[in-house]
Amino acid sequence: MEGGGRHRTAGDRRHLARAPGRRRPPGGLYGDHGQVRQLRQGLVRRVQTGGTGRGARALARGPAQVLASGESGGIPYVVSEYVDGPSLAQVLRDRGPLRGAELRRLAIGTLTALSAIHQAGVVHRDFKPGNVLLSRDGPRVIDFGISRALEETEQTGEHLVGTPPYMAPEQFAGRVAGPPADLFAWGSTMVCAATGQPPFGTRELAAVVNRIMSGEPDLGELDGELRELVARCLAKDPDVRPSATEALLALLGHQVPEQRLLAEGQQVAVPPARRRWPLVAGAVVTALAVVVAVLLTRPQPEPPARPAPVPPTPLAGPLALASSAELKLPDTGITLYENPADPVWVSSYHDQRSGGGFESYVRDPATGTFAHFGTLQEPVVSPGGGYVASLSGTRVRRLDFETIVLRDRVTGRNGEIRTVDKPDSLLLPRWSPDGRRLLATVYEVGESSSEVTGFLVLDAAARTTMITEAPGEGEGGFEWGSDGRTVLRGSGGAVRKLDLGGRLVAEFPGVGELVAGGGSRGSLGTVFATICPDKSGNVCLWDEGSGGKRGTVRMPEGSRFHGWLDDGHALAALRDGEHAKLVMLDQDGRDVRTLAGGPAAELDAVTLWFTRR
C-alpha cells in the first residue's frame, strides 16, 4: 500500500538545493603584467584583477563557473562568470560581526574553497575579508589565481605577498608560504568575522608583525568548536595547523568520502532559504570549478573502496533466572543484581535527579565498570556495544540545527553528526536489533506545542542520516519493526507500520497504545506489544504481519511495562512504598527475578538502559 510519506536525506548533508540560472558577464583575465610588477615591489594589501570589475575575478566556489584558463604572455589566467554580492569586509563595516549559523556557514564555505584550491596545487597567500564575497548562495573566495605563478617564480621568499594582519609567521620569516599560511589567514579572518577585528590588531605594521610572531591571538567572543579550530589554525608552527580538509571535516562533524567532501561543504554553506530548493544536475560540483581549471590534465584517481567495519554481534539467548552478583551505581542508592551469563545488562544510565548535575555514565564492555560520559547527555549503547549515541540536553537551545554525538568503538572515530534543522528536534533514540542503525523521532517544535513530522535513521558505520517525513496525530514516537527495515507508530489506539521511505505497509486499528520496544521475534512469531485496549492494564501481543492477537502478558497491579528482555520475559517496574525495583516478568505476570532496586525517587529520576551485550 502506498502512503503519504515523503523521503528526504540529511546527515551526509545531501540536502535539496537549487542552482540559480547562470549569466555570462564580460569576461576578464585574472592577473596581468602590471600586477606581477606590483607584487614584486613588496608588501601588497590587495591584489586587483584585470578585466572589468568583480566579474573578472576567479572564484574558488559557488555558482559562478570557470569559463576558461590559460596563459597570456607567460602569465596564467582564469576567466569566470559574474557573481553579485558584497565582500565580507564590506558587510563587517556596514552591519558588524556575524553570529551563529551565519558565521558557521561562512567558516564551512571558505574552508571548502581552500580545500579545492589546495587540492589543485594552489596556495592563495592573500586570504582575508576583502577576498570573500557573501552572495545569497553562500560565501565565495576570490583573488586566488595568481598565487601559483608567484610560488613557482619566487622560491627564495625574498618578497612579501599578502596583507599583514592576516599573514602567517613564516611569511615574515622569509620562508615560502604553503597551505598552512592560508589556514593561518583563514583563522584570522574568522576572528575578524566574529569580532570585527583580526586577532593581532590592525595598527602599526611593526606592532602587528611582532604580535603575529610572538604574541597570543585575541579570539574575542568566538566559542565552541569554531574557537578551538581557529586557535589550532593560529599556531605559530605551520606543522601544527590542520589542513583545510581536516578543518572542514572538523566543522562538518562527521567523515565524508573524499569525492563528496567539497560538494557537501558547499551545500552546508548555502543559506537554508535556498538549500531546500530542487537540485539541478551538476550544480553541486561548482565548488570544484577551480580544480578543473588548474588541473586540466591531472585527473584525481578514485580512492580504493574500504570495507565497512563490522560491529560486534549482539549476544543471543535468555537471561538467567537468578542473580549472582551485585553492583552499586556510582553516586546513587541503586543496586544492580546481575549474572555473568546474562546476555543483557545495564549499559548506560542518565541521572536526572533534581539538584544533581544531570550526569551520564556508560559501561566499559571489557571491565563492566561505569565511566562518566558527560553532562546533559543521553547516551544509548547499541546492542553488541559497538556504538554509543547521545542526544545532547542542550540541543533544544540551538537555533540552527541539531547533532548526535556518536562514539564508534569499532574504529575509534568519535564526533558529532549533523541531523535536523530547526525548528525540528529529535527524541526517543532507538537502536536497531543488529546494533547498526539508530532510529529517532523528529518533532517540529512550535511556540505552544510540538508535533511529530517523521523519523531519522542514522547509519552508524557510514555516519550518514536519512530523514523521512511521516506526519501523524498524537505524541507517540517511532519504534523499530522486528525486521529492522520497517518502523511502527501508534496513535489513537491504532498502530501503523511504515517502510523506511515512509510508505504505509499495514495498519492495525483498535489494538491499543503502542509501548516501547517495537517489534520482536520469538516463540510467538513476529509481534509488537500494546497496552491492551480493554483497559485491564495488561500488555497485549499482536502479530506484526496480520494484526491478529498472539497473547497477553498479565501485569501486576501498579506495575509498568518497559519492553522485552528476551523471548519469554518482560522488563517491568514495581513500587513498594518508598522502595522500587525493576524485575523480570514471565507471561503470566510472575516476578521471577529482580534486576535493579533502590529508592523509588531515584529509580524514577535515573534512566537505566538495558541492552544486549
Image (cartoon, rainbow, N blue to C red):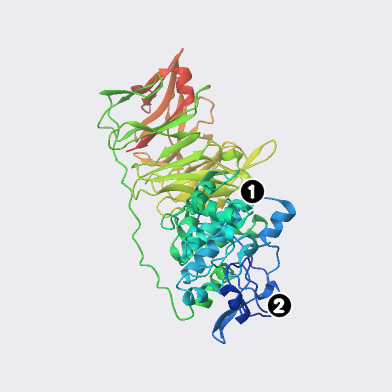
Q: Position of residue 493 (x, y in %)?
A: 57, 36
| Residue drawn at the location 58% of the way across and 53% of the way down | 207
Answer whether residue 187 is visible to the viewer in this image.
yes
Nearer to us in this view, 121 or 433: 121
Answer whether residue 529 is visible to the viewer in this image.
no
Q: Residues within 10 Å of mark 2 (few under 14, many from 20)?
A: some
Q: Which mark is residue 448?
A: none
- Image quarter where the C terminus lies is top left
Compared with residue 325, is residue 441 higher up or lower down, i.e. above or below? below
Compared with residue 147, is residue 353 higher up or lower down, i.e. above or below? above
Q: Secondary structure at mark 1?
A: helix
Q: Quadrant of residue 271?
A: bottom right
Nearer to us in this view, 353 or 449: 353
- Image quarter where the N terminus lies is bottom right
Q: Position of residue 308 (x, y in %)?
A: 35, 57
Tell me whether circle 2 and circle 1 mark residues in contact (CB < 8 Å). no
| Residue drawn at the location 55% of the way across and 56% of the way down | 209
**Which label's residue is closer to the chain start, 2 or 1?**
2
Q: Position of residue 547 (x, y in %)?
A: 48, 42
Amino acid carrying label 1: it is: Thr
Q: Position of residue 564 (x, y in %)?
A: 39, 34
Q: Which residue is mark 2?
A: 52
Q: Residues within 10 Å of mark 1 (few under 14, many from 20)?
A: many
Q: Which mark is residue 195?
A: 1
Q: Quadrant of residue 572?
A: top left
**On the picture, is 393 further left or further right than 408?**
right
**On the picture, is 339 further left or further right than 458?**
left
Q: Furthest-bottom residue in view?
A: 73
Nearer to us in this view, 167 or 4: 167
